[in-house]
Amino acid sequence: MIINLQPVLENEFIRLQPLQQNDFERLYAVASDPLIWEQHPNKDRYKREVFQTYFEGAMESKGALLLIDKRSGEVAGSSRFYDYNETESSLLIGYTFIACKFWGRGYNPAMKTLMIDHAFQYVDKILFHIGAINLRSQIAIGRVGAVKQKEISVAYHGEPEKLNFEYLLEKEIWQQHKTNKAIRIS
């Protein structure tokens, strides 16, 4: 099955659109805040040269999305779909970051809901790789029903390997969470 890894997805207050090469400066303006990367395994991604490597990986992935606040038109962050496995009926979602000014205001749950709903049109399982020290993201992904499966070393594009936890979200669990209105990712 062919999956669109760069769809335009939106709701009443956010829009996800394909990341373009000319988005670098606007996205780096968000990513240059060291607080965003405080719990991330690659804490220096706020530095321009390190972020450049991250951005190159995003462009090469052909699954990166730019998060836009529809009210202000501001770039609020980014996420991506990657490593689609048709045989396993799985897809990864990750490389997500959001500007601090949007934290705790519903942007992450809105973005994840749009992305997860889109992905589950094509696959039965979604995986998330989350840094072993990124407690904020581990708690957030657990709120949607994702379960830690294993510990793995992940080498992000052009970066050294770091310990990550792999979380699994199955379609049935997601549907139960949506039915129960228990979706809260922050």
Image (spheres, rainbow, N blue to C red):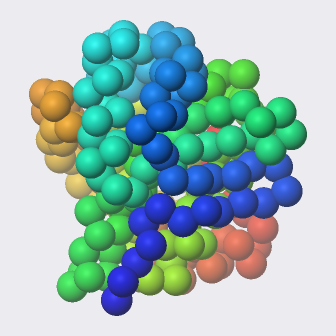
Whole-percent x, y for residue 159 in the image: 17, 28
Q: Identify the residue at horizontal 70%, vertical 52% (top origin).
A: 15
Q: Is residue 148 visible?
A: no
Whole-percent x, y for residue 44 in the image: 33, 13
Q: Nearer the viewer, residue 43 or 75?
A: 75
Task: Judge whether 131 appears above or below 48 on screen.
Answer: below
Q: Quadrant of the C terminus?
A: top right
Q: Is residue 14 visible?
A: yes
Q: Nearer the viewer, residue 16 or 137?
A: 16
Q: Identify the residue at horizontal 42%, vertical 31% (top origin).
A: 134
Which image quadrant is residue 29 in? top right
Q: Nearer the viewer, residue 149 or 112?
A: 112
Q: Residue furthest front?
A: 22
Whole-percent x, y for residue 147 in the image: 42, 60
Which image quadrant is residue 126 in? bottom left
Task: Judge whether 173 appears above or below 105 on screen.
Answer: below
Whole-percent x, y for residue 178 in the image: 71, 72
Left or right placement of residue 143 versus residue 132 in this view: right
Q: Identify the residue at horizontal 86%, vertical 39% (top origin).
A: 71
Q: Residue furthest bottom?
A: 1
Left or right placement of residue 175 versus residue 1 in this view: right
Which image quadrant is residue 43 in? top left
Left or right placement of residue 3 versus residue 158 in this view: right
Q: Identify the residue at horizontal 36%, vertical 83% (top origin).
A: 2
The total number of labels drawn is: 0
